[in-house]
Amino acid sequence: MIHSKNMLTGITVASFLESTIVPVPLEAMLIPLMQARRERLWLIALMATLGCIVGAVFGYAMGYFLFDLVGDWFIQTFSNPEQFDRVKQQMQSQGFWFVMTVGISPVPFQIAMLAAGATQFSLLYFLLATAVARSVRYFGLAAVVYIAGNKAEALIKRYKILAVIGLTAVVVLLWWLFNTFA
């Protein structure tokens, strides 16, 4: 797949699937691919981001239009009723920041997509938060590969938890500042 002419399409499809039905992080595939194809590094990050955004629209639409039919299955598969009720409350009061936090953290993004759709959260704000969060995630990986080269995979494995905690803390701090001073 690394040198396939369909590599970018494959990344987009994989990102779509990762954001909708396969709750397995895409990073395991992206990092080695970015290292092997540094000349297409930023395009790989862009296609992963676009695939995720398209998947997010799909998940939002499922929550918005089909929640009564498929919502119970998604909740049982990816969450539990109590957690989903908390998510719905968060969406109604702090949707943008909630989507940003879930989009950066290792929490399955399906929860945010369904909650946004099921609560009829603004599609524009949902897409904006999704695009920012996933851009931080995928372009951040690309930046590490660009700077560290072949050492990127080892660095990411070593500091992944610390980076996720740091990025999540930054988003939560921005969220708090926004609520405090807005």
Image (spheres, rainbow, N blue to C red):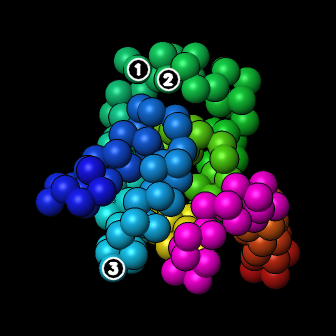
Q: Residue furthest front?
A: 150
Q: The residue tagged with tag 1: helix, strand or loop? A: helix
**Predominant secondary structure in magenta?**
helix
| Tag 3 near tag 2, CB within 8 Å | no
Judge whether residue 23 can be spotted in this image. yes
Mark 2 sits on what residue? 74
Q: CA distance from mark 1 to mark 3?
A: 42 Å
- Residue 164's x, y, as percent? 73, 59
Residue 150 sits inside the magenta stretch: yes
Q: Is residue 110 magenta?
A: no
- Front residue (pair 15, 40): 40
Is 96 on the left or on the right of 73, as rendered?
A: right
**Furthest-left residue in this view:** 5
Tell me, for residue 39, which label it has, or none. 3
Q: Secondary structure at mark 3?
A: helix
Question: Relative to residue 44, is residue 16 depicted above or below?
Answer: above
Determine if residue 125 is in view: no
**Contact check, label 2 and label 1, Cβ < 8 Å:** yes
- Residue 36 position in % (x across, y down): 40, 66
Counting the numbered discs, the total is 3
In front: label 2 or label 1: 2
Sequence-earlier tag: 3 or 2 = 3
Residue type, label 1:
Val
Element carrying mark 2: helix
Left or right of 25 in this view: 40: left
Q: Residue at x 42, y 27 (%)?
A: 67
Q: Which residues are magenta?
A: 145-164
What residue would you read off at disc 1? Answer: 70
- Does label 1 or label 3 sit earlier along the sequence? 3
**Residue drawn 52% across the image and 48% down it:** 28
The amino acid sitting under disc 3 is: Glu
The amino acid type, in three-letter code, at marker 2 is Phe
